[in-house]
């Protein structure tokens, strides 16, 4: 058997990008399993949601958005600290960069290592990496809720913290009037979960409960197609929960009987692959996911920092 190429390093094909108008002035760009992004139009400004991995990549998205609106970007919202969602921030020229309090702290604590790690794992997303001016620093942070009045009769955009999940500081962007939810990586629609920096048990219970309670009728997840209609929204949330539940069960059972990390990886892989194995980034994510969950269930409170070196070690141990 030949070794699997590291993470997504061999995934170099261009992805099909689709800009969808979900309600008046509400835009989502999906990308065939690559990170999704969005924008919400206010009366005289735009709120951008997520920033992609580099300014050059972000400018391509902005050019598509500019076919619909030429209003300036007042707010750039970052759902969490991961490099492929924040390092393109400078392209937006936003007045305010909003994120959760914990996201700012995580950027200070591990932003540099995360940048190197993600660049090694997903080089294709880093279009012209030299265009990145440095780490992205939020200029407004909050702990629970941050409301943006969109003006006119457009209603509010509510940024909410739903609990620990994909990271310690994920937020969602919710439009109560239009019932559209930008869920960041807290929900994936037909894409594998990355849980290498996650709090699996919180995420699978209270956090997803809080996301579901919003009652969205359209949901833009971190990756995958837009879920349209309550049934599709519920299915995306259920799939996310199921992925987590299976991981927790399998890793817990292996630990219970005194097994090894490698055995836990095999058990999770065997259980998840029939349902999720063909979805984007499944093989890429799983070693990092199981490694973090192993720690979590062993009592390691906060995720250990991923570095380019640690990535390769875990990969060699579990996927090699
Ligand atoms: Zn992420």
Image (cartoon, rainbow, N blue to C red):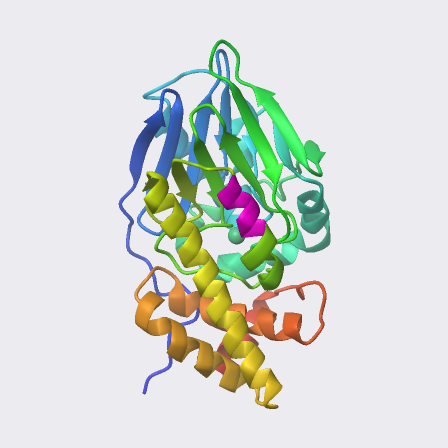
What residue appears at the point 50 percent right and 11 percent down from the top-left corner?
44
Where residue 88 appears, x then y in whole percent?
Answer: 51, 39
30 shown above or below 196 = above
Compared across the picture, whether 56 is left or right of 30 comes to right
Where residue 14 appears, x then y in whole percent?
Answer: 28, 50
Does any portion of residue 273 appear in the rendered image? yes
Where residue 41 appears, x then y in whole percent?
Answer: 45, 20
Residue 12 shown in magenta? no
Where residue 89 appears, x then y in whole percent?
Answer: 54, 36
- Residue 255, picture quadrant: bottom right
What residue appears at the point 39 percent right and 66 percent down from the top-left corner?
282
188 shown above or below 311 = above
Quadrant that contains the C terminus: bottom left
Magenta part, dominant SS = helix
227 shown above or below 294 = above
What residue appears at the point 38 percent right and 34 percent down from the top-left corner?
28
What residue appears at the point 42 percent right and 67 percent down from the top-left corner?
284
Q: Which residues are magenta?
A: 207-213
Toward the viewer: 277 or 155?
Answer: 155
């Amino acid at each position: 058997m030949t070794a699997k190429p590291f993470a997504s390093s061999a995934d170099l094909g261009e992805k099909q990008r689709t800009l969808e108008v979900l309600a008046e002035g509400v835009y989502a760009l999906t990308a065939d399993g690559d990170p999704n992004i969005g924008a919400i139009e206010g009366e005289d400004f735009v709120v951008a949601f997520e920033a992609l991995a580099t300014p050059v990549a972000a400018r391509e998205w902005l050019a598509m958005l500019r076919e619909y609106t030429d209003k300036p970007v007042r707010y750039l919202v970052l759902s969490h600290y991961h490099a492929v969602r924040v390092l393109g921030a400078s392209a937006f020229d936003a007045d305010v960069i909003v994120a959760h309090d914990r996201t700012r702290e995580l950027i200070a604590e591990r932003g540099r290592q995360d940048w190197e790690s993600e660049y090694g794992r997903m080089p294709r997303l880093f279009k012209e990496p030299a265009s990145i001016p440095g780490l992205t620093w939020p200029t407004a942070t909050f702990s629970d809720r941050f409301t943006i009045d969109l003006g006119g009769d457009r209603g509010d955009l509510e940024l909410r913290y739903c609990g620990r999940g994909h990271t310690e500081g994920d937020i969602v962007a919710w439009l109560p009037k239009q019932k559209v939810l930008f869920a960041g990586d807290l929900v994936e629609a037909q894409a594998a979960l990355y849980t290498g920096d996650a709090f699996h048990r919180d995420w699978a219970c209270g956090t997803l409960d809080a996301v579901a309670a919003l009652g969205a009728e359209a949901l833009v997840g971190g990756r995958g197609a837009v879920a349209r209609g309550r049934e599709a929204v519920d299915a995306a949330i259920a799939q996310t929960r199921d992925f987590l539940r299976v991981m927790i069960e399998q890793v817990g059972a292996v630990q219970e009987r005194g097994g090894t990390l490698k055995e836990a990886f095999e058990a999770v892989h065997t259980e998840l692959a029939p349902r999720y194995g063909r979805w984007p980034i499944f093989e890429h994510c799983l070693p990092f996911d199981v490694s973090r969950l192993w720690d979590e269930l062993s009592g390691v409170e906060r995720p250990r920092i991923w570095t380019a070196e640690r990535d390769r070690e875990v990969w060699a141990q579990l996927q090699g």
